[in-house]
Each structure stands twice: as structure tokens, then as C-alpha cells.
Amino acid sequence: MRFKDLRELTWEDAGLYTKYYEESETELADACPNSRIAWNVGYHYRYAIIADCFVPVSDGGIFTQPHFTLPLGQLNQEKLNTIVAEMRLLFREEGWPLCSMFIDESYVPLYDQVPGLQPVWVQDDDLSDYLYDAEKLRTLKGHSYRGKRNHINQFVRNYPAFEYRRIQKDDRETALKLVSNWCEEKQIDCMDPNQSDYLPIAGLFDAWDFLQVRGGILFVDGQAGALGLGSLVHKDRAVMHFEKARDDYEGLFAVINKLVLTEEFPEATMVNREEDMGIAGLREAKESYLPERLIKKYEMTGK
């Protein structure tokens, strides 16, 4: 088996991918169907079904090194042993070192028991996902969230005519214009997935009919000022994939965060707001919402 022989992961595979994803117990935002397929613009995933598990394999793309991800499905020791044996052959044929990425901490013991694998583990806190109590972020009650409430109240006083609405497929151009303007303000290339999420967001809209995307868009003075896009997984967990807000409206980010979660994810008990990538400002913002815990993700190299 060679990499080129695997099936390319596309939006049309969203249903199949979701089936195996929902059978798994992974908590990582990276594994969420919308996230994995949207960011495939940079990862170049293909996949195989091995031991009744969905196994994404990347040649590294423009982001990282060749790897296979945590297999999705009802994974157990016997199945992982079979999958690793197949991956050994594929990676050897390609001349790649054996590597598996985006692994939850709870699955590490399974890898440790694979015969002859001798895994070496890497875990980077910059890549850990932030997990929050959804009801706390919907209500923002208590002294700890007073600053957030003040920001929201100030925004509402300054811009009482703002409009929030549920985002739809037809909002594609409006949303992408907002992201493009954001990239221009930050002086980054919106066409480079290493710098911007413009192309993944465009992909979500292009494949809207294949996906279960939820989100909202907020207008100020008749112009799109902020958006949030996410999905509901494992029945009661929200994953926020993309959030953008203009910097020139104080409190706007706090408003869009609260409204999207309140209006689009009322049934969510927990919300995954993804990683901070080691960016100091982003880390400060995520920590200010008081996460319940961080979800660690692991990378493995082996034999």
C-alpha cells in the first residue's frame, strides 16, 4: 500500500468520517469532522478503513511531517495493533519515519502496548485544547466574569442597533470579506493556511450541504463586524472552529462569543475553544474565560 493508493479525504466523505468519529471517544478539536476536513487544505489527508476504523494519513502537507492520526471508531488494542502494522508497511514504502499525531492522552496506553513499537512521546502545552463549561460562558455569572459583562454592556450601549443573525450558506461572501479585511489589518497573506484561516472557512461554505455547521454573524453600523463558526459533536459538546471580530469595536469579541454559544448551541454542556498555539495574546484571552481543563494532545514516533 502506498500513500497515492489511499482515497483522498474530501467533503463528500464527511458522512463516513462522522460515523467513525462519533464512535470514537476523542475529545480533540482537530479530529472534529468540520475541522479536519476544512484544514485538509494544508494537511493533504488521504485515508484507509483498517480493522473497521477510519485512518487518516498525511504526507505532511504544508504544515508538518508525514503521519497518521488517531484512528477513529471503536478502537481497541487488537485493532490498533493491526493498524500500526499496516502503517509500518506504508511508511516504510514511502521512506517516512513512523509517526502518529493528534492522540488523546487516554489513548496513549494503547500505543504503549503495541508489540515492538517502542513509542517516543511529545506533548506541547501550546497545542492543548481549552475546554469550558458551556453554561458558564452563556451566562457569564459571578465576579470572575464581571469584566466580560462590562465589555458586553459597553458595546450594547455604544452600538444599540447592532444585529445578530444565524449564519447561512448565502453569507459566504460577507464572511470571507470580513476575514479578508482582518488579514489585511494584520498584514498577513489570507491565501496562506499557515497564516490565515481564510481558505478553511471558504471550504466550509463551499461544502455547506455536506456539513453540520452552526454559527452567527454580527453586524455593526450595517457592516459585518464579527463571526463565529462551530459544530456540535458527541451530542452535547460544542467545538468552536473559527472566530473573528474587528478590533475597532470594543467588546465585540465578547459579544459574538456569548451570542453564538447562547443562540446556536443551547444544548451544549461543554465547549472546546481549541488551542492557543503559544500566542501570548490568544492564551491570555482563552485563560480569561476560565477553562475547566486543558485537553492534551500527543505525538508519537516509533518503530
Image (spheres, rainbow, N blue to C red):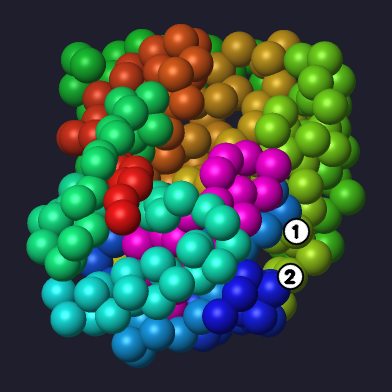
Q: Which residue is mark 2?
A: 207
Work out whether residue 60 or residue 152 is closer to the camera in this orientation and state it.
60
Using the numbered discs, state the Cα–Cα distance from disc 1 to disc 2 in whole angstroms. 6 Å
Q: Which mark is residue 203?
A: 1
Work out whether residue 182 or residue 170 is closer to the camera in this orientation and state it.
182
* Residue at 41% in and 52% down: 99
Stretch in magenta: 54-71
Residue 139 visible to the viewer: no
Work out whether residue 9 or residue 88 is closer to the camera in this orientation and state it.
88
Question: To which quarter of the image does residue 22 belong?
Answer: bottom left
| Residues under numbered marks 1 and 2 in contact, where contact means CB atoms less than 8 Å apart | yes
Q: Quadrant of the N terminus?
A: bottom right
Q: Is residue 223 magenta?
A: no
Q: Above or below — where is 279 with respect to 164?
A: above
Q: Quadrant of the C terminus?
A: bottom left
- Tell me the kind of residue under disc 1: Gly
Q: Secondary structure at mark 1?
A: helix
Q: Is residue 302 left or right of residue 230?
A: left
Q: Is residue 96 left or right of residue 272?
A: right
- Tell me the kind of residue under disc 2: Ala
Local packing at callout 1 (Cα closer than 10 Å; few below 14, some 14-19, many 20+) is some
Residue 26 visible to the viewer: yes
* Residue at 33% in and 17% down: 288
Q: Is residue 286 left or right of residue 117?
A: right
